[in-house]
């Protein structure tokens, strides 16, 4: 069953049912802070569906993060689930750090957890278009009506914001040129006997290239810089939310300094050793061709795209897929609307100004609003792992921590 517009007003509304939204819902229910009928998760794509689609689109087989990172609160929940299902072989050993779950194990465990808490019954199948912060609650506008809630937790990920290289902007909507994160991109729809170009040199481009490489298909990987190998997305100090976090919080909230520090310490554009080995093998066997030069010009020609690189080499491709990353976390359409709210404080490049202890979005008058943020948009507080699964757990702790005191205080006031 899915929640409808006529159900009672929720106490807490979570916008986004991805890793972060699901974890917040599970944590709130496990802490018994709200009854299921007082909680609502709004997502038009389905619980975890957007992330599942991305993993499929880039051909990801295993997680980069260890098995203790998942959407439940108990770190060993996924391992116990694997044991109970006799699927320990889906915990893939790693040369550095703990074993990593396969994509299917991760999502089966997450689906099991959603079933345990019957999260589908509290999902409202709608897209949030705007949120208004009021002193005593929030008003949430959706494409299927209006919801009033006491608290709103924003967990919308990158919100469909991804980047194309400059030379591709005019071609982005033409048939042969697409982005790996375009919701319409389907790797299975690519013709078997075709010539495919992939742009990018990080984990996504590498995984996609090795997935698409097959007999009869020519795959060209356009990676302008040498491959860089890193096990995780940043140093493990950041993953433990120690060390660097203090330095981050030493800069003003919402500032350029915080944004630049996060971007400097993230190992963007890297790939872990197991992906690098796969690329190396595919290159050695000539399943993939590597073009080290940058594309300078691309022109559509009768359903194909002709690209010319800076080293003057030219290719005629049936498909050109950009694996060139996400856009700014503050550029999704919902954040655009929220930025225009006169009451909420925004900082450098539209970053929400959040309270470091609670992740509550601060108002212009310096008081915390009733909107809290989890996910990549909280990176100025939680650092480079804010977007990751472990970031969801850290954000969950902070958000559920403050909600516990607020909701208990409200209950006491009602009793008086
Ligand atoms: C291919 C890939 C592999 C990754 N691998 C790992 C890994 O191994 N380990 C790790 O820790 N992290 C990994 N990450 C990073 C991170 O864990 C994921 O990006 C994760 O999906 C982030 O969760 P999220 O909930 O913030 O965002 P999302 O999964 O994007 O979920 C956001 C949800 O919000 C919904 N939404 C957006 N806008 C609205 C709106 N206006 N109204 C209502 N709903 C809305 C969307 O439909 C979506 O379901 C990976 C990321 C990618 C892309």
Image (cartoon, rainbow, N blue to C red):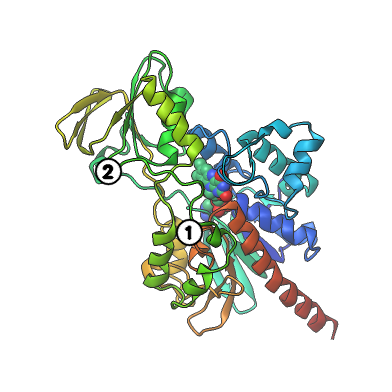
Task: State the image quarter where residue 319 is shown.
Answer: top left
- Tags 2 and 1 in contact by the CB under 8 Å rule? no
Location of residue 158 in the rendering, given as x and y in whole percent from the top left corner:
47, 53
Total numbered labels placed on residues in the image: 2
Kindly give the residue lying farthest to the left in the view shown.
312
Q: Secondary structure at mark 2?
A: helix
Instruction: Assess disc 2: are there few (<14), some (14-19) or many (≥20) residues with their C-alpha within 10 Å of its C-alpha.
Output: few
Q: Residue at x 43, y 43 (%)?
A: 229
Q: Earlier in the sequence, mark 2 or mark 1?
A: 2
Mark number, residue 334? 1
Mark 1 close to ligand 1, CB under 8 Å: yes
Q: Residue at x 37, y 71 (%)?
A: 256
Location of residue 260 in the rendering, given as x and y in whole percent from the top left corner:
38, 65
Q: Residue at x 52, y 74 (%)?
A: 246
Residue 311 in view (yes/no): yes
Q: Quadrant of the C terminus?
A: bottom right
The residue lying toward the viewer, choosing from 405 and 228, is 228
Query: Which residue was labeled with disc 2?
Result: 169
Relative to 190, say whether 240 is above or below.
below
Relative to 214, say whether 325 is above or below.
below
């Amino acid at each position: 069953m899915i929640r409808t517009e006529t159900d009672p007003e929720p106490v807490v509304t979570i916008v986004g049912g991805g890793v972060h939204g699901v974890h917040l819902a599970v944590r709130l229910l496990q802490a018994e802070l709200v009854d299921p009928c007082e909680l609502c998760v709004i997502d038009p794509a389905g619980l975890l569906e957007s992330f599942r689609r991305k993993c499929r689109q880039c051909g990801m087989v295993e997680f980069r993060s260890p098995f203790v990172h998942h959407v439940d609160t108990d770190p060993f929940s996924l391992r116990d689930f694997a044991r109970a299902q006799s699927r320990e072989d889906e915990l893939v050993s790693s040369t550095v750090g703990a074993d990593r779950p396969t994509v299917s194990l991760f999502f089966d465990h997450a689906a099991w957890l959603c079933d345990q808490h019957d999260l589908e019954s509290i999902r409202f199948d709608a897209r949030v278009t705007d949120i208004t912060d009021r002193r005593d609650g929030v008003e949430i506008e959706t494409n299927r009506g209006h919801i009033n809630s006491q608290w709103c937790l924003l967990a919308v990920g990158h919100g469909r914001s991804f980047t194309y290289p400059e030379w591709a902007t005019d071609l982005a909507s033409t048939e042969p040129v697409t982005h790996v994160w375009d919701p319409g991109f389907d790797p299975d729809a690519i013709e078997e006997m075709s010539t495919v170009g992939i742009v990018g040199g990080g984990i996504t481009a590498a995984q996609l290239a090795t997935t698409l490489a097959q007999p009869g298909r020519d795959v060209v990987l356009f990676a302008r810089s040498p491959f860089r190998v890193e096990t995780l997305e940043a140093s493990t100090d950041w993953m433990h939310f120690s060390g660097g976090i203090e330095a981050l919080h030493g800069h003003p909230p919402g500032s350029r300094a915080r944004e630049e520090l996060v971007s400097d310490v993230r190992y963007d554009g890297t790939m872990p050793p197991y992906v690098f080995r796969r690329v190396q093998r595919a290159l050695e066997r000539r399943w993939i061709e590597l073009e080290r030069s940058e594309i300078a010009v691309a022109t559509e020609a009768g359903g194909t795209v002709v690209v010319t690189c800076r080293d003057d080499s030219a290719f005629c491709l049936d498909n050109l897929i950009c694996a060139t990353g996400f856009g700014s976390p503050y550029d999704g359409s919902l954040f655009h609307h929220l930025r225009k709210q006169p009451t909420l404080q925004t900082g450098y490049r539209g970053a929400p100004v959040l309270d470091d202890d609670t992740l509550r979005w601060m108002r212009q008058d310096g008081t915390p609003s009733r909107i809290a943020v989890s996910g990549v948009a909280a990176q100025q507080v939680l650092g480079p792992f804010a977007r990751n699964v472990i970031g969801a757990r850290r954000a969950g702790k902070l958000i559920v921590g403050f909600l516990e005191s607020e909701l208990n205080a409200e209950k006491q006031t009602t009793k008086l």
